[in-house]
Amino acid sequence: MTPYESLFRHVAVRVPAERTHRIGLRALAAATPVLPDRTPDPSLAVHAMGLTFPSPLGVAAGYDKDAEGVRGLARLGFGAVEIGTVTARPQPGNPRPRLFRLPDDRALVNRMGFNNAGADAVGERLATLRRGGPLGTVLGVNIGRSKAATGPEQTVADYRYSARVLGPLADYVVVNVSSPNTPGLRDLQGVDALEPLLAAVRDELGTTPLLVKITADLDDDGVDAVADLAVGAGLDGIVATNTTVARTGLASDPAVVDACGAGGLSGAPLLEPARRVLARLVARVGGRLTIVSVGGIDDAAEARWRLEAGATLVQSYTGFVYGGPAWPSRVNADLARS
């Protein structure tokens, strides 16, 4: 166990998870000018979707919702930073507490509910970032549906607005239809609802690469249907997977798990579900789309496994939370040695 992990265990039983996250993100942003630059080894560069990723390892959406720590995360060694999820309208998200740790499983449970500053505010922040010069990383923007947007027409208009505002500032855009924390959102993974939504976002983005993010809870037929739609709609890739609502096979005390309540589970327990979806996607669309594998990536060995299994890129959130600020550079160094 590293000193950071020992400290994390100490903090985990004393400080609420969301408060710790906010403190950590603000500290990262403040310290960015003096952080050592952990630029990945040039051998790790990946060329995909017309972009050059300094490393295949990115930080998943959810960590930096409002683009507050992009430059700091780049300096830690992430080859991509996917901000968001951002919605067209600002919204506070679900009531607190809404983020919980399960240290015995190296997992998190969240029901954040897309809390974010909204597309206009985030767009202004991204414009300021862009004016400051190269970011040192690839910038992805993950967009979702505002809670107030109900019905098919409002939903499409909501995603359209976010794409219009944020697309010109992003290197790529991800349509999130897979979070379990916005009522009805996962219904959009059905082809009938997803097809017009993706067409509308594509229309707004023009040539900016577009991906869709799916859940670990889709069955094989559902994965195949989304994969086929992504190819047919001319998408550039698929991000797989989002969190799961399942709670099977956990080492944590069941009472502790129950106390977390509803929400998406992330971290090590997602390893096998994420591998299953990756294998299905590779078999269905391998070579035709960029596949970003996320879920349960805790070290370089697992990142390497995903890449060798057919993923183009990988992402982590919970592994980074548990591993600490030196984690991405350690993973990069291990990948470069392999």
Image (cartoon, rainbow, N blue to C red):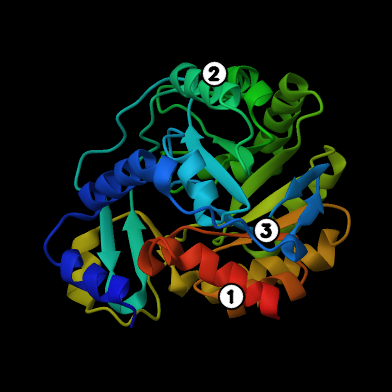
Q: Is residue 193 left or right of residue 285?
A: left
- Identify residue type, mark 3: Ser
In front here: 135 or 192? 135
User: Along the horizontal axis of the image, is 204 left or right of 242?
Assistant: right
Q: Residue at x 40, y 22 (%)?
A: 148
In what element is the residue under mark 2?
helix
* Mark 3 or mark 2, whichever is nearer to me: 3
**Disc 2 to disc 1, C-alpha distance:** 42 Å
Tell me what residue is drawn at x 43 percent, y 38 percent.
65
Q: Amino acid at mark 2?
A: Gln
Q: Return the residue found at the far left.
A: 14
Give the alpha-carbon distance from disc 3 to disc 2, as whole Å: 38 Å
The quarter in which the C terminus is drawn is bottom right
For numbered disc 1, what is the local secondary structure? helix
- The disc at residue 198 is none
Q: Pick whichever of labels 3 and 2 is earlier in the sequence.
A: 3
* Labels 3 and 2 touching (C-beta < 8 A): no
Q: Which residue is mark 3?
A: 55
Q: Say above or below: 106 vs 101.
A: below
Using the numbered discs, state the Cα–Cα distance from disc 3 to disc 1 in whole angstroms. 12 Å
On the picture, is 8 further left or further right than 160?
A: left
The residue beneath circle 1 is 300
Q: Callout 3: few (<14), some (14-19), or many (20+) C-alpha neighbours within 10 Å?
A: many
Question: Residue flagged by tag 1: what amino acid is it?
Answer: Ala
Q: Is residue 69 above or below residue 289?
A: above
Please tell me the numbered disc located at residue 154: 2
Q: Nearer the viewer, residue 177 or 299?
A: 299
